[in-house]
Amino acid sequence: MSRQNLKGMTVAELQDFVLSIGERKYRGGQVFSWMYAKGASSFEEMSDISKGFRDLLAKSAEIQTLEVVAARRSPKDGTTKFLFCLADGLVVESVLIPPERTSPDAGKRLTLCISTQVGCPLDCKFCATGTMGFTRNLTAGEIVDQVIQAQKHASRRITNVVYMGMGEPMLNYENVIKSVDILTDDRSLNIGAKHITISTAGYADRIRRMADEGRKVKLALSLHSLDNEKRTRLMPITKKFSVDELLDAMEYYYRKTKRRPTFEYIMIDGFNDTASDVKKMVQLSKRIPCKVNLIPFHSIEFTNPSGFASTLKPSGRSRIDDFANALRRENITVMVRSSAGADINAACGQLAVLAIGREGLSQVPSSSRQLPASYAT
Ligand code: SF4
């Protein structure tokens, strides 16, 4: 008889499960806390649960756990990138990002950027993950477990989670929202909803749905250009939801939730960093009160891009600063993201693409894999 994987179940689902094997409902809450708050990956670890119940659980259930197959820490800024192996041998990434040393949050905030899909179908031209194609959605358990396993390697508590790693969260909406519900539960990791950000490449319908559902999580849109034709070249999803449709949905989100969304903007030389782009961003902020994150473009040369993708080059630092200052003069809240982890391939999908390309990690069963020294934890 196959055993039921409990990782990814909500407390209500665990209560139903323990009732189904003849135990009392409250025991579901005990298992929930052990799995998520204490990070237990076996029933033996659940020391305040009776031996009889643990034996019963071991017969009928299991706790699937991601395996850390690589962890690279940047000596420059402390960013740590994890490569996780899933139960079926596929790999995904998460990135642990401390605030900059000069930030007022230094020593307090610790952010984990997590994946929601293996690969991604959206083919954004600046993104290494986009070159992998799409394999499958992650389960809620696999999404939550990135936080649990990364926490075991972190020197302090993970306070913030951003759904901005491999994959488009809105294409795995049910599992993403279920994972949010687990992460925010005070018997689990108890991460405040206000400290969780879900990012999308532009699913206008799901943005509206998120607004209607009323969770307190934050929303970020990977915008990158307000010009429909340019954005379509950069992000083919724009053919499905145009810039106008997206902005309508973002305005709807703001009006409904009263929360300012964040617009993510990767700075690409000569493509989206001109005075006319500044002007469009200023107009946007007048329509939708927002924050803007300017992100230095991490080259994806190692994927051997062709066509339009091969023409993309990072904006120079002074161009990024000029862009930021021009927005600030209009009282727009702007963050210029550092190139965190540039020395460890920390941009979305970079480590996984390199690992798969060099070592064939996703093809090799976990039990027989020999991890090369360069990926050792
Ligand atoms: S940027 Fe995000 S949505 Fe676009 S291809 Fe990469 S992972 Fe997918």
Image (tube, rainbow, N blue to C red):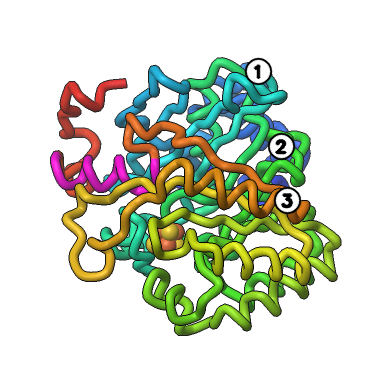
Residue wearing tag 1: 107
Q: Is residue 212 left or right of residue 153?
A: right
Name the residue type under label 2. Ile
Magenta segment: does it hold 316? no
Residue 1: in sight, yes or no?
Answer: no
Residue wearing tag 2: 191
Counting residues from the start of the chain, the first of labels 3 and 2 encountered is: 2
Q: Which type of secondary structure does the marked residue at label 2 adopt? A: loop
Name the residue type under label 1. Gly
Relative to 356, does residue 135 appear above or below in the rendering?
below
Q: State the image coordinates of residue 341 (x, y, percent, origin top left).
A: 41, 32
Comparing 219 with 320, the one in front is 320
Q: Which type of secondary structure does the marked residue at label 1 adopt? A: loop
Q: State the image coordinates of residue 151 (x, y, percent, origin top left).
A: 55, 26
Residue wearing tag 3: 329
Counting residues from the start of the chain, the first of labels 1 and 2 encountered is: 1
Who's the residue at 59% across and 19% down the image? 101
Helix, strand or loop: magenta stretch: helix
